[in-house]
Image: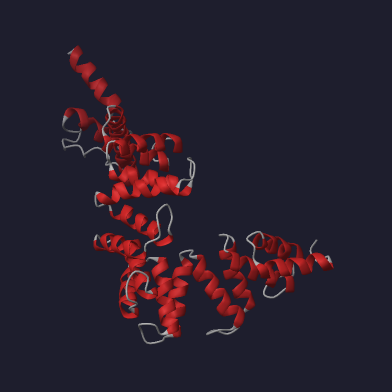
Amino acid sequence: RKEGVYREVRLRAQLPVCPRSRDQRSGLLGGEGERGQSAPPLCSPTPRRRKAQAQMAGAAAEAYQLRLTIDDAAQGNPSAQFYLAGRYERGDGVVQDQAEALRLYTQAAAQGDAGAQQRIGVYYMTGDGVAHDEKKAARLFRQAAKQGLACAQHYLGNCFELGAGVVQDADEAMKLFRQAAVQGLLDAQHALSRCYATGEGIAQDDEEAVRLFRRAAKQGLAGAEFNLGNCFKLGAGVVQDVGEALKLYRQAADQGLPEAQVTLGDCYSDGIFVAQDHETAAQFYSLAADQGNAHAQYSLGFLCEHGMGTKRDLAEAVRLYRAVAARHSVRALARLGMCLEKGRGV
C-alpha cells in the first residue's frame, strides 16, 4: 500500500498542469473517473512546445556530433579537420577563430585533402591571416585541381587568365574553366562564357557565350545576368533588346553587383534607354560607391558637387574625389585640383 501511494505521488509530480476538473484528473491514475468514464488523455503539447522540444533534441544531437568531430580531428582525421575548420571559419557552433581554422586546414591539406588545399590557397591569394603569396596560392590550387575539385580548377583558371602566381596562359585557363564547368560549377560556366565573348584562349563565339550566360543567369549568378545584359544591349550573339538588357541589369544590381549598379546609374544620369533622372542615378551610384567602385565614387562626387539629384555637398564631393584620386585617376585629380584651387569643400 505504501509503495502504491509513493508511486502515485511520483506520477502526479510528473504530470503537466492541465485545465481539467478534479474528477477528470482522477482517471489519470485510477483508469476511470468518478463518473465511471475513461479519463481524457493528457494535454497535447502545443506546436510551440513541440518545436522547442525538437530544437532541444536537435541542439543536443548537434553538440554530440561536434564533440565527435573534435575528437576525430584531434586524432588526425583529415575530413574531420576540414569540416571543423569550416565551422571555425564561419563561427558555426563555435567561437569564430580564423587562426584555428587555418591551423586545421593546414593539417588536413598536409594529408592531401583537396578542399583544405583549396581553402588555404584562398587565404594566401587574399592575404587573409597570412602573408599574401600568389605563387603559393596557385601551387595549392593546382594540388586540389589535380584531384578534380571544381572550385580549385576555377581558381587556378583565374590564376592563368590573370597571370597571378603563374605565367599568364589563356589556353590553360580555358582548359581549366572547361573542366570545372563540366562539373556544373556556375562560376566556371560564367568564366567560360566570358572567354567565348572575348575570344581569350578560344575563337570568339558570341552565340555560345550567350548560351552559357543564359544557363548561369537562370541560376541567379549576378555576373552572368550583367554580361547577358551587355549582349542584349549590344546585340552580340542575340537580337538587340534594350528592355531585356535593363531588366537583367536590375536583377544583377538587386544582388549587389556594383558593375550593374554603375551601368544603371550611367543610364539614368545620361538619359540612355531611360528618361533622365539624376535622383535615381545618385541612388545607384551610392550603392556601388559604398562598395568602393571608383567610377561610382567619381560620378556621385560630381552630382554632389553640382547638387544634381541630391543636395549640394561640396565636402562630400571632395571626399569622394580624394578616394578616387588616390587610385591615380586623372579626371578625379583634375576635379579635386579645381576644388582646392577655388577653396570649394575645403
Q: Is residue 125 above or below residue 7?
A: below
Above or below, 17 relative to 247: above
The quadrant the C terminus occupies is: bottom right
Residue 122 rendering spot, x and y as whole percentages: 41, 48
User: Residue 302's spot in the image, x, y percent?
Assistant: 69, 71
Give the side of residue 231 with respect to residue 6, left or right. Answer: right
Q: Which residue is drawn at the image coordinates 57% and 63% (left, top)?
A: 293
> Of 96 and 75, which appears nearest the observer?
75
Tell me the quadrant of the picture where the N terminus can be found: top left
- The part of the image, by quadrant, that contains residue 241 is bottom left
For the question of whether residue 96 can be seen, the reply is no
- Of residues 117 and 214, the one nearer the viewer is 117
Q: On the picture, is 37 further left or further right than 154?
A: left
Display colour scheme: secondary structure
Look at 33% across and 67% down and name the residue there. Answer: 192
* Residue 144 visible: yes
Q: Residue furthest top?
A: 2
Q: Percent x, y for residue 244?
A: 42, 81
In this view, the residue in front, 226 or 118, is 118
* Outermost front residue: 167
Looking at the image, the residue that sits furthest to the right is 342
4 shown above or below 250: above
Tell me the quarter of the picture where residue 49 sits.
top left
Residue 107: % across, % down: 33, 34
Number of callouts in the render? 0
